[in-house]
Amino acid sequence: MGSIFRSEEVCLVQLFLQSGSAYNCVSELGELGLVEFRDVSLLNPLCSFLLLGAVHGVQCNYFLEQEINRSLSSPSKGPLPPPCPMPSAPQPRELITIEEESERLARELKEVSAEMEPEEVKCCLFPLYITVFLSLSFVAGVVHPWKVPSFERLLWRACRGYIIVDFREMEDRLEHPDTGEMVQWTVFLISFWGDQIGQKVKKICDCFRTETFAYPESSAEREEVLQGLQGRIEDIKSVLSQTESFLQQLLMKAVAVLPQWKVRVQKCKAIQSVLNLCSPSVTDKCLIAEAWCPTAKLPELQCALREGGRKSGSGVDSFYNRLPCSTPPPTLFPLNSFTAGFQNIVDAYGVAAYREVNPALFTIITFPFLFAVMFGDVGHGLLMTLTALWMVLEEKDPKLRNNNNEIWRMMFGGRYLILLMGLFSIYTGAIYNECFSKGLATFSSAWHVGPISSVLAGSQYLSMDPAVPGVFTSPYPFGIDPVWGMANNKLTFLNSYKMKMSVIIGIIHMTFGVCLSFFNYWHFRKFSSLIFVLIPELFFMLFLFGYLVFMVVYKWVAYAPSQSKSAPSILIHFIDMFLFTENPDNPPLYRGQAIVQKVLVILALCSVPFLLLGKPTFEYIMFKRRRRRVVSLRLEFDVADVFMHQAIHTIEYCLGCISNTASYLRLWALSLAHAQLSEVLWEMVMRKGLTWQGYVGAVVLFVIFAFFAVLTVCILLVMEGLSAFLHALRLHWVEFQNKFYSGDGYKLSPFSFASIINY
């Protein structure tokens, strides 16, 4: 819990990598993903040369992969599978072998593919000859199907009916010899009378660029030509079969080695990129690098350096030294599949500064709860929970993990967040006693029917009034009594209940955020902020808005339902508190209330100048003392800047307490809107289907239920869920996190092959 509450300790280390083992040491660090390297490079031609060699290897593998994808059949095309097991980074001398082998395979694939293309064209064209020679026409050939109407029209007009033309479409599509497109050719057979007509026909065929075939006069010659064509087709098919078999062997060989080569070359390229960030020593016997490393991982760092030296056969081990740093270290939180979604919500606002309190730990509970307050419904929460539970149970499925749809990746990454939102929505829905807008009679109602009947005697609407004798006996055991669903004043009761609930939750949430700043001030030794900022902020918040929560809770406890008519108005008391007045029509909540309220307002108002002037004055006094002690140092203190910064903070906080408290009323508004929209959907859609009777009613109910289910998912789950999510996000970013969270840090991005390699 400590590392997620506050980021891990990170230190700056200086690595001394021996020249003979630097490559293997960086390779070991890349496999473990421990450190983030800083750029301390000078001009290093050796590393640049090695990097160019790695880039050339990447290009060779890229061309080989393109040739494989082009040669594979259409159903097999797609990304190559990742290698298993994952290969290690190659040595620089091995990269030359990979480059030569990849070039040789790519060249052989290209040559074999080039030899197959003309043979395939011949194999496709020879059936045209066979089709032609099986007929008894004088002029025969093939024409593009687009040219058939104009070709036939011109033949008829030019030859004036002295010809017989027959057109037939081929069953199979063949490749066009010029464009390469697949065309369903049309075979034409033309019989004519006279040499002049024959010349016209041949000229028209040449004009339309048709493929005509020589037509032997005698049947013996035609039979001889047909046998020759059949023999050539068999020879070409045999050559194609052997060539395709050889091509498949090459492809299998390339597919087997290409993923490994690709990974190894990318690792080599990444290692050379890191080596380019290093600086050579004065004697050129080692490379000097600087990197950020978690303090807890320093033993693993030393082990990785020793392992790299052992693999290189170096007699001198590489080592590291810790360096003092003037810049803030990067932030690192250990995450897993559960906490990653909540941490992403916080990081979208800003990455936590080094060792700053991380709001993600508390967001795990507060975010789903605030969402559920606005989305509370047992039925809707159950549907959301089942959807998230399916994603959680199938999280190892490669089809779900590797889906490239951006919306799906966002949902799948936040599956645990959605699961908690659904569970909390079931809980708050049980509190509201709403399941698809209908109440659940889990326990017996505390309202009696007999007295209610007497109340209904003069009205057609049921109005719930606990002040009527004998109507209300005790509170409902859990949640809201389902009898309120039939009451005419249900909305008035829920408005009052949810509005007060929203204010109480909001003030507790903000006060908790102010209290969390204590841990930041204490850790960073900002004791002046602890006294002159935190204490007045708490006084202002608790003496005004905390007292409002006290009045709400005190009224609930001190006044029985039978006294609801004579209970004082909290809103009027809160207004009179700031005006220093008393309203005789509004009785006090307790004895001495007026004096207590005046004292609280005075203390809250006094905390404002203390918050405004306390810290700048203290810092100015401390600056004067330091300057008296150290006369030689020229210290400067910008009074105007410090006071202006504190004034902005004071104004923002005081006004924010008011505006942020009002902002939490969105909990009440969205909860009410969700309940009303759900009720409208039930009344306007589902209830209509329940009025039908018989077999027709069953069919109508099935159709209406399908329509109701679609609207429920699209409107109430997706749209309303997204709206509640965005409002909960705003409450955390603006109302909660700005009380203690700066978010001006940057993440630790360790050098890791797992995050660099692209399959």
Image (cartoon, helix red, strand yellow):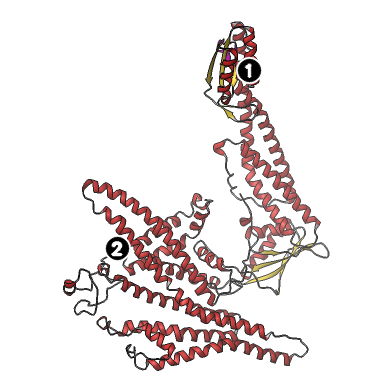
Q: x and y percent of residue 317 in the render?
A: 73, 63
Give amino acid for label 1: Ile
Query: What residue is rendered at 56% in x and 73% in y?
Result: 6
Residue 623, visible in the rendered structure: yes
The numbered mark at residue 204 is 1
Position of 720 with respect to 259 (left or right) is: left
Which of the two discs, 2 and 1, labels the residue nearer the N terminus?
1
Q: Is residue 136 magenta?
A: yes
Quarter of the image holding residue 577? bottom left
Q: Nearer the observer, disc 2 or disc 1? A: 1
Position of 492 with respect to 62 (left or right) is: left
Of the pair 5 and 16, the residue shown nearer to us? 5
Label 2 and label 1: CA atoms lie apart by 82 Å
The stretch of residues the image draws in magenta is 131-139
Of the pair 271 and 369, the residue shown nearer to us? 369
Q: Is residue 567 magenta?
A: no
Q: x and y percent of residue 682 in the render?
A: 31, 58
Q: Which residue is mark 2?
A: 438
The numbered mark at residue 404 is none
- Mark 2 Cα within 10 Å, few/some/many (few <14, many 20+)? some
Quarter of the image holding residue 486? bottom left
- The local secondary structure at tag 2 comes to loop
Quarter of the image holding residue 586? bottom left
Of the pair 679 and 88, the residue shown nearer to us? 679
